């Protein structure tokens, strides 16, 4: 290892405890001469200037509803922690979604623990109202959120963890990954073969009809996002082809009288939160289907799609001569394609044996198996169908925070 390499590392990284690397540098320059002494002094200065890892009980990765919920319960446990949020502002993940998006659940079910959502209980908040609520929540409880901190590495250091985010690092006894499974947009490889004149984008980049060309639109993916975006575009004058299998739907209007007062609460608070859980046989069966096929349509009904003139077709299977081709061999002449095909989980930055053979976290109610001190909150069906919903994430957050608090107290008693 060269002098230049070691000095550059000591000054550039400015994070972590680089005592071993610094010692190696001093060994290199430690032999004789004024020039060597000068380089040695520069090395010491660079190493001393690099901030050491901040030592905390817990690092929470993700400042959305899952991370803030975890933070609320950690604060009640009186633990030292930080919440690292990659975006520059709390709530930006919501703000970047399409302009007309409203939550699928009424405001009475859109509160995190300790703070009601500031809107009429039967109203459906906009995505910007949800973003502002999360920001206000963090302020109200003085949660230690560090924004603009994208975590690049999580690794074990002895019996603790080192979490690196740019030029800062944290030394923690526990790490909570408070993120959904939705990190990297899933787009089929053949999408690159579409004719260049076809406008194509992933649903995560869709904002409004103004982004599209006049003409037909293929919506690839018939889940909630695909159905909602398809309806909006049909109402703006586009011919819509909706591709993909039927995911099922809730058989009542969530905004109607029965939906708001009886059936909605029954589905959201009873079925999704208490029946469809890993603690029941029906819940365990439901989990496999939810992960493989997604949740049913909540607001949109098949009759709504039919009334808007939306054509339902099979899966997009390939591209031929620049055009999308369905699994039945039919080619589609469209001017636009929106990939509502979901996301890949991306945990490449977690350098720990925490995953099963498919790359999914191996956990029990968010507590990682065989990796003490590592947790996940916010995953799809972490414990229940409601785990990724605003009204369900608090229970998972409280469970994990309680496990962390109990473990820290037990360790303190053993050390006493």
Image (spheres, grey):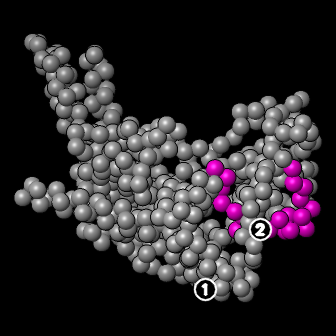
Neighbourhood count class around disc 2 (C-alpha, 10 Å): few under 14, some 14–19, many 20 upward? many
Residue drawn at 56 percent across, 66 percent down: 276
x 27%, y 50%: residue: 172
Is 303 magenta? The answer is: yes
Q: Splitting the image into 4 quarters, where does residue 144 fall?
A: bottom left
Give coordinates of residue 272: x percent, y percent.
57, 69
* 370 horizontally vs 207: left or right: left
Circle 1 residue? 120
Q: Nearer the viewer, residue 64 or 249?
A: 249
Q: Is residue 365 rendered to the left or right of residue 181?
A: left
Q: Which residue is mark 2?
A: 300
* Tally of numbered tags: 2
Q: Secondary structure at mark 2?
A: loop
Left or right placement of residue 335 versus residue 37 in this view: right
**Residue 334 seen from this side:** yes
Identify the residue at the far top of this view: 32
Return the residue nearer the eye: 136 or 29. Answer: 136
Specify start and end residues of the magenta stretch as a single range. 292-313
120 or 106, which lies in front?
Answer: 106
Residue sitting nearer the eye, 334 or 7: 334
């Amino acid at each position: 290892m060269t002098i230049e390499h070691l000095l550059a590392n000591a000054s550039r990284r400015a994070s972590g405890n680089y005592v071993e690397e610094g010692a190696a540098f001093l060994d290199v320059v430690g032999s004789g001469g004024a020039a060597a002494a000068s380089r040695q002094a520069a090395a010491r200065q660079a190493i001393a200037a690099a901030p050491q890892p901040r030592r905390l009980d817990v690092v929470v990765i993700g400042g959305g509803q899952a991370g803030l919920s975890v933070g609320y319960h950690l604060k009640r446990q009186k633990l030292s922690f930080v919440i690292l949020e990659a975006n520059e502002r709390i709530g930006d993940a919501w703000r970047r979604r399409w302009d007309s998006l409203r939550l699928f659940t009424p405001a009475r079910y859109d509160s995190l623990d300790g703070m009601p959502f500031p809107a009429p209980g039967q109203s459906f908040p906009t995505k910007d109202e949800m973003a502002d609520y999360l920001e206000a929540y963090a302020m109200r409880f003085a949660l230690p959120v560090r924004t603009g901190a994208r975590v690049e590495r999580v690794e074990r250091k002895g019996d603790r963890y080192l979490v690196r985010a740019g030029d800062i690092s944290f030394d923690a006894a526990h790490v909570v990954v408070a993120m959904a499974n939705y990190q990297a947009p899933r787009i089929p490889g053949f999408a690159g073969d579409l004719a260049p004149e076809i406008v194509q984008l992933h649903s995560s980049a869709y904002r409004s009809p103004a982004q599209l060309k006049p003409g037909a639109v293929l919506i690839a993916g018939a889940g909630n996002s695909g159905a909602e975006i398809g309806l909006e575009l049909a109402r703006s004058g586009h011919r819509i082809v909706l591709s993909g299998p039927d995911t099922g739907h809730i058989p009542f209007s969530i905004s109607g009288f029965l939906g708001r007062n009886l059936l909605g609460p029954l589905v959201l608070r009873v079925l999704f939160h208490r029946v469809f859980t890993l603690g029941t046989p029906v819940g365990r069966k439901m989990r496999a289907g939810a992960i493989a096929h997604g949740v049913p349509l909540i607001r949109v009904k098949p009759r709504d799609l039919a009334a808007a003139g939306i054509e339902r077709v099979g899966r997009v299977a390939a591209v031929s001569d620049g055009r999308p081709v369905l699994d039945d061999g039919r080619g589609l002449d469209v001017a636009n394609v929106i990939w509502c095909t979901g996301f890949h989980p991306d945990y490449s930055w977690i350098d720990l044996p925490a995953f099963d053979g498919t790359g999914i976290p191996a956990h029990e109610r968010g507590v990682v198996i065989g990796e003490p001190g590592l947790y996940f909150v916010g995953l799809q069906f972490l414990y229940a169908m409601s785990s990724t919903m605003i009204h369900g994430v608090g229970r998972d957050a409280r469970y994990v925070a309680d496990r962390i608090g109990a473990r820290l107290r037990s360790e303190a008693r053993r050390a006493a």
